[in-house]
Amino acid sequence: MTKVKTGILGATGTVGQRFIVLLSSHPQFIIHSIGASSRSAGKKYVEATKWKMTSDIPEQVKEMVIKECKAEFFNDCDVVFSGLDSDVAGEIEMEFLKADLVIFSNAKNYRRDPVVPLIVPTVNPSHFNIIPHQRSVYSLKKGMLVTNSNCSTTGLVVALKPLQDAFGPIESIIVQTMQAISGAGYPGVSSLDIFDNVIPFISGEEEKIEYETLKILGELNSNQKEFKLLSSTNVSAICNRVPVIDGHTECVSIKFKNQPSPSPQQIIDVLDSYACEAQKIGCYSAPKKSIIIRYDNDRPQPRLDRDNGNGYSVTIGRVRKCNVLDVKFTLLVHNTVLGAAGSSILNAEIALSKGLLEI
Ligand SMILES: NC(=O)C1=CN([C@@H]2O[C@H](COP(=O)(O)OP(=O)(O)OC[C@H]3O[C@@H](n4cnc5c(N)ncnc54)[C@H](OP(=O)(O)O)[C@@H]3O)[C@@H](O)[C@H]2O)C=CC1
Ligand SMILES: N[C@@H](CC(=O)OP(=O)(O)O)C(=O)O
């Protein structure tokens, strides 16, 4: 089988390193080109990177020379994954799109764009249907730009999607996050700030969760050209940084529009039996279970549950009645796997199976 040639932008960063690990053993994709800033360009990967993954740098990547993130250097890639800093992602990703390249981005820059889908692979792959329209807007033959969501939003929508499908619209969502340090990139939050501490502010995070949830759980109009955001759902997010390396924990309370609301057991049954499209079509990275339910009172925990489903599952526990809204629970998502690089990769697998990639 011909492997899909992939490029990685921001390959030296936290998300970029996760891309390297996940792609180095991928049966369909091969790492072909890597890019980062001009500080790293021209250097061998092993020399330019402060490697922070628990496995070693894959042999095939160590000696690769980092390129500048210019479309001309990635023209021969079938797919380009972006883990670029959002300060530069906007301009670079647009240059790549206009060069008719295929980009799967982790950055926030185009998530709100009316012709760019915001796709969590285990939730809303139907939003790929906007791609023909995007291609006509930008006069593209084979290129496209697909974003995946903010890492905390990712965990939240995985839990809400099956509930919305089964029980109808969700009227109110209140979510409090406890987000890992790796979410801030490298070197990120200083140890003097985060050790023995909790920081009750992550710039722009609450606004992203409150907006992105409505786009992802919304739908495409029947003409497949416009996203219809959920309009009658209120989302309130409170975000905290905590001294955890990987894995975002979220305490969620929700109220359904339709009353009487489902019981906690009905909620558990629906979450537990959720099978997403990526699983059904047999995508390589799709977890066997998108949602893993834990029944113990003290789970999920980041250290114990973040690698469930190789980091592609969301783990949910403590599902119970809420005395203010209808139901509350705690969830855990791996912020750099399903919350970042893994989502891009699984999105690319879905695009491949939908025939959207020209290889
Ligand atoms: N960490 C996480 O959990 C999540 C991150 N994201 C998003 O993913 C993206 C990457 O995040 P993260 O990996 O944490 O960030 P890092 O700061 O760890 O890495 C940033 C990367 O961008 C590169 N870069 C910086 N400036 C330039 C430039 N001028 N030109 C080209 N490349 C440049 C860096 O290269 P160099 O090493 O050469 O400086 C590095 O490879 C961000 O947009 C972030 O918001 C999304 C979801 C979760
Ligand atoms: N802000 C997130 C990570 C991130 O970069 O998010 P986004 O891709 O939405 O900017 C965190 O700190 O955990």
Image (cartoon, rainbow, N blue to C red):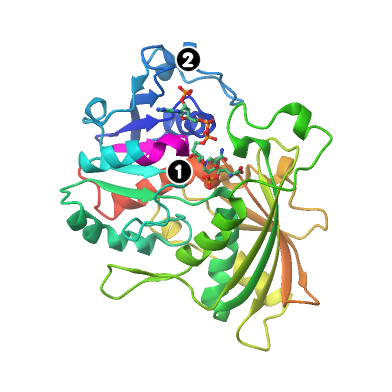
Under circle 1, the secondary element is loop
Q: Residue at x 51, y 34 (%)?
A: 15
Residue 157, position in %: x, y?
Answer: 55, 61
Q: Is residue 87 magenta?
A: yes
The residue carrying mark 1 is 107
In magenta, the rendered stretch is: 79-90
Residue 145: image location, x then y, percent? 32, 48
Determine contact: label 2, label 1, CB under 8 Å: no
Task: Report the amino acid beneath label 2.
Answer: Ala
- The image quadrant where one finds the N terminus is top left
- CB at disc 1 and ligand 1 closer than 8 Å: yes
Q: Earlier in the sequence, mark 2 or mark 1?
A: 2
Say above or below: 22 vs 167.
above
Query: Residue at label 2?
Result: 48
Q: Is mark 2 within 8 Å of ligand 1?
A: yes
The disc label shown at residue 29, or none: none
The answer to whether residue 74 is left or right of residue 165 is left
Residue name at image x 53 percent, y 53 percent: 288
Residue 184 seen in the current view: yes
